[in-house]
Amino acid sequence: MNQSAPLLGQPPGDRDRRDAIHIAIAPVTASGELRPGQHVGPLPDGRFGVVEKPIGIVDPFLPGPVQDGQPFWLCLYPYTITSLRHVWTHPEFKPTLPVK
């Protein structure tokens, strides 16, 4: 991990400055009503909701809650994706075929 990069989830230090980051996102479906920024993870039915070990948060920029069955962007926790090359991988998601 690049120690000069911002560490999301930690307060910035005295020497930290503005920066830009990449966040892995995935389109998923809500199980129950979910709030922007709420910590969620995969459920056995493939939808996302409140779980013991969440893997990300509901799109924090939404103006209001996501309703049961609605799609939303899942923002995966920083530093959890296992590979990145314009298409990322994560242990909780099946690999997808490259777009041609």
Image (cartoon, helix red, strand yellow):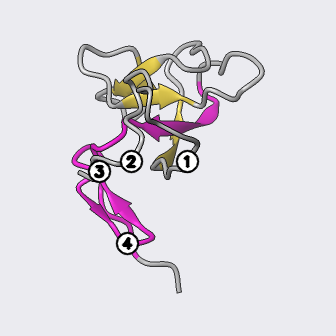
Amino acid type of the residue that numbered disc 1 sits on in the rendered structure: Asp
Upstream in the sequence, badge 2 or badge 1? 2
The answer to which of marks 3 and 1 sits earlier in the sequence is: 1
Residue highlighted by disc 1: 19
Separation of residues labelled 4 and 2 (CA atoms): 19 Å
Mark 4: few/some/many CA within 10 Å (<14, 14-19, 20+): few
Query: Disc 2 versus disc 3: distance between alpha carbons?
Result: 16 Å
Give coordinates of residue 86: x percent, y percent. 45, 70
What residue did someone put label 3 on?
81
Determine which residue is flagged by label 2.
5
The residue that disc 4 covers is 85
- What kind of secondary structure does the magenta stretch mostly adopt? loop
In this view, the residue in front, 78 or 97, is 78
Instruction: Looking at the image, tell me whether mark 2 or mark 3 is earlier in sequence order.
Output: 2
The relative height of residue 76 versus residue 19 in the rendered view (above or below) is above
Give me the C-alpha separation between circle 2 and circle 1: 8 Å
| 96 up-or-down from 41: above or below | below
Q: Nearer the viewer, residue 82 or 31?
A: 82
The crowd level at tag 1 (other Cα within 10 Å; few <14, some 14-19, many 20+) is few
Q: Amino acid at mark 4?
A: Arg
Q: Nearer the viewer, mark 4 or mark 2?
A: 2
Q: Is residue 84 magenta?
A: yes
| SS for dot 1 | loop
Looking at the image, is 10 positioned above or below residue 2?
above
